Amino acid sequence: MKTKLFLLGMCIVAASMFEGCKKGEDDPGISFRCRKGRVAGEWKMVDFKYTDTDASGISTLTSNGATYTYTDPSGSNTGSWTWDATFEKDGTYKTTEIQDGVTTTTEGLWNFTGGIGDLKKKSQITFYETKYTSPATSNTYSGNYVDYAMDLKELRNKKMVWYYKVTSTSPSGTSTFEQQVTFEAK
């Protein structure tokens, strides 16, 4: 009887530990790979949704990983767009975007946030771009700054979802930017 109670207690402790590892709202309940191991690898964008709402109206950009549609108060247009990313465990990354036949690459460093305010540790991914290359320019950057941070809404072995929403209020009005990007492992 004591053995059964001990095993039951151990199962309860183990289950609570696995749930404590869940950072994003749609993360798996149990994962045998660390968060860094789940990010590391080759990814392709399969879904992109962006909305910008301000006094001039609503602008949206959506993509299914092959084509995009951009709409604003003056009209809309469509085209081709792919976005691939490679994340290494050493904290480096490289992205390649091809939009309407124009290739842009970025390189840099990535890491998790340490948990700020109500955010859990490793619930956001941050990017520090060190190199940007397009047909028109090639820039390198140095210094201590973060280009952007994204909430990791979902991080699985073969799926990663980034999300952010920012509302800005100024004397000229309120603007809201919201973006969600879904990647699948290549």
Image: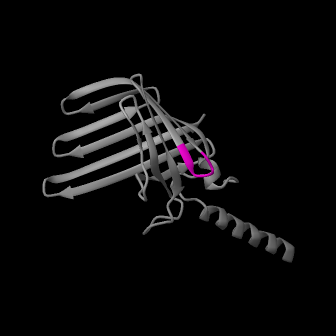
Q: Is residue 109 magenta?
A: no
Residue 14 seen anywhere in this rendered image of the structure: yes
Q: Is residue 91 magenta?
A: yes
Residue 1 seen anywhere in this rendered image of the structure: no
State the image coordinates of residue 161 (x, y, percent, origin top left).
50, 45
Residue at image position (80%, 69%) is 7
Question: Can you name the residue that lies furthest to the left here?
Answer: 171
Residue 81: quarter of image: top left
Q: Quadrant of the C terminus?
A: top right
Vertical placement of residue 25 versus 131, above or below: below
Residue at image position (59%, 48%) is 39
Question: Can you name the residue that lies furthest to the bottom here?
Answer: 2
State the image coordinates of residue 126 (x, y, percent, origin top left).
47, 54
Residue at image position (35%, 52%) is 165
Residue 73: quarter of image: top left
Colour convention = one colour
* 135 to the left or right of 170: right
Q: Nearer the viewer, residue 18 or 137?
A: 137
Q: What segment is highlighted magenta in the picture?
A: 88-93
What's the magenta bit mostly, secondary-structure-wise? loop
Residue at image position (65%, 50%) is 37
Q: Quadrant of the N terminus?
A: bottom right
State the image coordinates of residue 23 (x, y, percent, origin top left).
54, 59
Q: Nearer the viewer, residue 166 or 104?
A: 104
Q: Nearer the viewer, residue 131 or 48?
A: 131
- The number of numbered badges drawn on the structure is 0
